[in-house]
Image (tube, grey):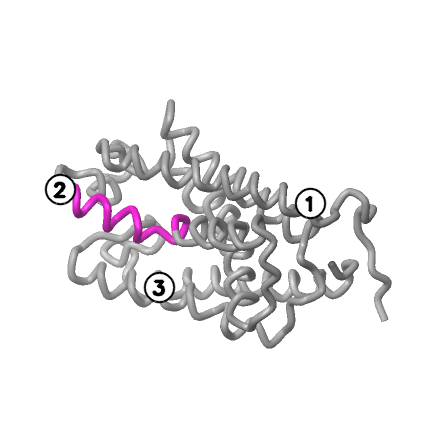
């Protein structure tokens, strides 16, 4: 049986845990709202001079910009972190199958999305000013806080292999939604998933690779969770 390990209990008591989750909630709220304001003002997630197709999300149609904004998996994962941290910040001790799956989604999709962003999206990005601030918050700061919250402040010792199946529902639903919507509106939120450029075979192969990465991270998180001091 693995020996639980982790930071000293004094540093991660209930009050400190709620405080950390509250800070994470505030940071992710700032990140999402800032990016939303920028999109409403006409900013693109990826500049037009690097990828015109992606930049259509910043066209003159406000409704299209808003729908495009909420079509990014990054936004979905950050909102999940926001929801989960809100429940933890108020001391709601959740341990239902649904909540565990949503928390696993929040942490893994956000952290894994940061990895995917670094390798597949970063080469297309050349943003500045507030766009750069929003990008760093969404793809670096929030994933880091989510990971620290999982490992250090918990709640720990609750994730199980049976949570992996429900965990997959959200990313698979997002992929299906993205491909179906893209076929109608001719727009895809990320360059590597653009069927018009790469074709369905390449996009599905890339999506499978990303899915494998997410599964590895999810299994790793569950395994790690079992070795941490319950709390």
Q: Residues within 10 Å of mark 2 (few under 14, many from 20)?
A: few
Label 3 sits on a secondary structure element that is helix
| Residue 61 badge | 2
Quadrant containing the C terminus is bottom right
Q: Residue at x 50, y 38 (%)?
A: 26
Marks 2/1: CA–CA distance:
45 Å
Label 2 sits on a secondary structure element that is loop
76 relative to 65, above or below: below
User: What secondary structure do most residues of the magenta stretch adopt?
Assistant: helix
Q: Residues within 10 Å of mark 1 (few under 14, many from 20)?
A: few
Label 1 sits on a secondary structure element that is helix
Residue, disc 1: 15
Marks 3/1: CA–CA distance:
38 Å
Closer-to-camera residue (8/135): 8
38 relative to 70, above or below: above
In the image, which residues are magenta?
A: 62-75
């Amino acid at each position: 049986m693995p020996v639980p390990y982790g930071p000293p209990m004094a540093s991660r008591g209930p009050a400190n845990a709620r405080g950390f989750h509250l800070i994470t909630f505030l940071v992710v709220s700032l990140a999402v709202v800032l990016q939303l304001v920028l999109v409403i003002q006409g900013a693109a997630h990826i500049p037009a001079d690097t990828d015109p197709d992606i930049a259509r999300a910043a066209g003159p149609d406000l409704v299209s910009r808003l729908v495009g904004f909420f079509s990014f998996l990054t936004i979905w994962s950050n909102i999940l972190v926001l929801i989960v941290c809100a429940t933890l910040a108020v001391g709601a001790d959740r341990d239902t199958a649904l909540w565990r799956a949503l928390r696993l989604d929040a942490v893994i999709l956000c952290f894994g999305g940061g990895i995917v962003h670094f390798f597949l999206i970063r080469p297309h990005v050349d943003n500045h000013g507030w766009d750069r601030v929003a990008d760093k918050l969404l793809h670096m700061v929030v994933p880091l806080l989510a990971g620290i919250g999982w490992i250090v402040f918990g709640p720990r010792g609750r994730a199980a292999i049976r949570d992996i199946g429900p965990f997959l529902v959200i990313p698979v639903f997002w992929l299906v939604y993205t491909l179906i919507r893209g076929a109608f509106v001719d727009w895809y939120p990320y360059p590597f998933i653009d069927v018009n450029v790469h074709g369905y075979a390449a996009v599905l192969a890339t999506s499978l690779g990303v899915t494998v990465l997410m599964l590895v991270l999810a299994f790793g998180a569950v395994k790690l969770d079992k070795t941490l001091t319950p709390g």
